[in-house]
Amino acid sequence: MDEMIELGINAKHSNEDQIAPYEEWINRYNDRIGLLGGIDVNTLCLNSPQEVFQQVFEKGSQFRNMAKGYALGSGNSIPEYVPVENYLAMVEAAQAIRAKEM
């Protein structure tokens, strides 16, 4: 990762929990690159919309407080098998995070 940063990347997406918890990405690289993601695709696939909203709201709030710059999203692209209701729950949680900080 250090070599990639030296080559000029300024942000990273697809930070999957199986590779390292998102908090670890923030702790290691927060001061050097922008971080995008933080919400594991499994969260979006395996939970009810209410659970997705709650988990995204909690984790997204935590990550936003920890990071200098953070863009909430899934840990990967959104595959077609993610229930639409769960994707929308993630979007609504992100909007709720922004609304509480204004």
Image (cartoon, rainbow, N blue to C red):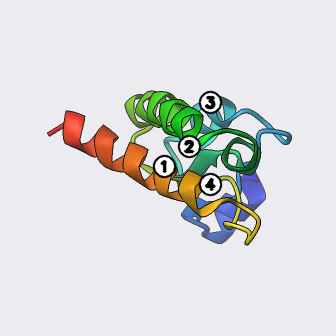
Q: Are marks 2 and 1 in contact (CB under 8 Å)?
A: yes
Question: What element does badge 1 sit on?
Answer: helix
Q: Are marks 2 and 4 in contact (CB under 8 Å)?
A: no
Question: What element does badge 4 sit on?
Answer: strand
Viewer-nearest of labels 3 and 4?
A: 4
Circle 2 sits on which residue?
A: 49
Look at label 4 and name its amino acid. Ser
Q: Is residue 17 above or below residue 80?
A: above
Viewer-nearest of labels 2 and 4?
A: 2
Alpha carbon distance from label 3 to label 4: 14 Å
Query: Where residue 23 is drawn, which disc sits there?
Result: 3
Q: Are marks 1 and 4 in contact (CB under 8 Å)?
A: no
Q: Is residue 1 above or below residue 102?
A: below
- The mark nearer the N terminus, 2 or 1, is 2
- Choose between 39 and 81: the one closer to the eye: 81
Residue drawn at (73%, 52%) of the image: 2
- The mark nearer the N terminus, 2 or 4, is 2
Circle 1 sits on which residue?
A: 89
